[in-house]
Image: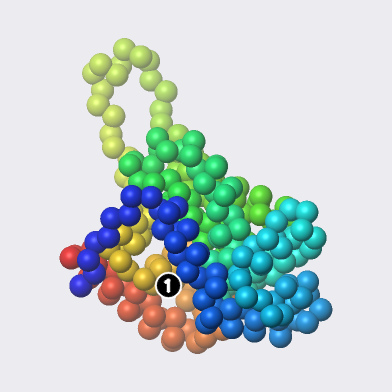
Amino acid sequence: MYEPTRIPCFSSRLDADWARLRTCRRALVRARRWAHDDRSHPLSAILDGIDDLGSIVVATQRGAGHDDDILLRLVELARHDELAGRIVVQRLLPGLIARSIRYRSHADGTDPVEIVVAAAWMAVRSFDTERRRRHVAASLISDAVFNAFRAPLRRRSAGEQVRAPERFEYVVAAVAEPSSLEELADVVRAARHAGVPATDLDLLCRLAQVESATTVARERQVTTRTIRNHRTRAVERVQAAIAA
């Protein structure tokens, strides 16, 4: 059974997680392996002897040199390596927080940072690294903010009808049915609060996005059967958490 966890500030949780992760021995060993994929890539020079993942984040910042190239490589790795995705999210976090504050009134009491970070994970996984090779950080932040806040607002606006002011006295507006993506977001948010592992939720979100177990299997370099088995277990965990 998953016990609900109440976190007053999601960004504080992310900070604590990053403080633990950035010098974690297993994470450092894993990151060093990326250097073997392409020794000529600028990322490899950073990974040799790295003792703090924060060095990678610094290298992706504007003016650091090869910042877009390094961030693009991390985004590519993030398709099948969650550690790379976590580093990308950490790089984007200041911008995500700054851009999400203005949408606090649209978050229905939920920390907008939590909403935009979840959208950032999906933005990273779906980013077109072949066609969008410049201003990578800004593009990812814009994608995440749009998917988290602006797209739902547009869907809501598209369903509104202009009425004469006096008609509001007599007509009760029908409540719009939530879209499947909105319903999924609500379930994911509740499951996350209930303690369901992020790996399970990330898989379900990606499957919902591409609607193809074969595509996800190819991205993660595993069999379709493996993805389907993981999906089944993830759904069972979410169902158990929500029921609890």
Report the residue that reaches farthest toward the left: 244
Quarter of the figure with the C terminus = bottom left
Is residue 200 depicted above or below 116 in this figure? below
Viewer can see residue 197:
yes
Viewer can see residue 128:
no
Q: Position of residue 188 (x, y in %)?
A: 35, 60
User: Residue at the location (41% across, 31% down)?
Assistant: 160
Q: Residues within 10 Å of mark 1 (few under 14, many from 20)?
A: few
The residue to which callout 1 is attached is: 199
Q: Quadrant of the rendered structure where residue 131 is?
A: bottom right
Q: Looking at the image, what colour scheme do you see?
A: rainbow
Quarter of the figure with the N terminus = bottom left
Q: Quadrant of the rendered structure where residue 32 is?
A: bottom right
- Looking at this view, is 53 or 225 the one in front? 53
Report the residue that reaches farthest toward the top: 166
Q: Amino acid at mark 1?
A: Thr
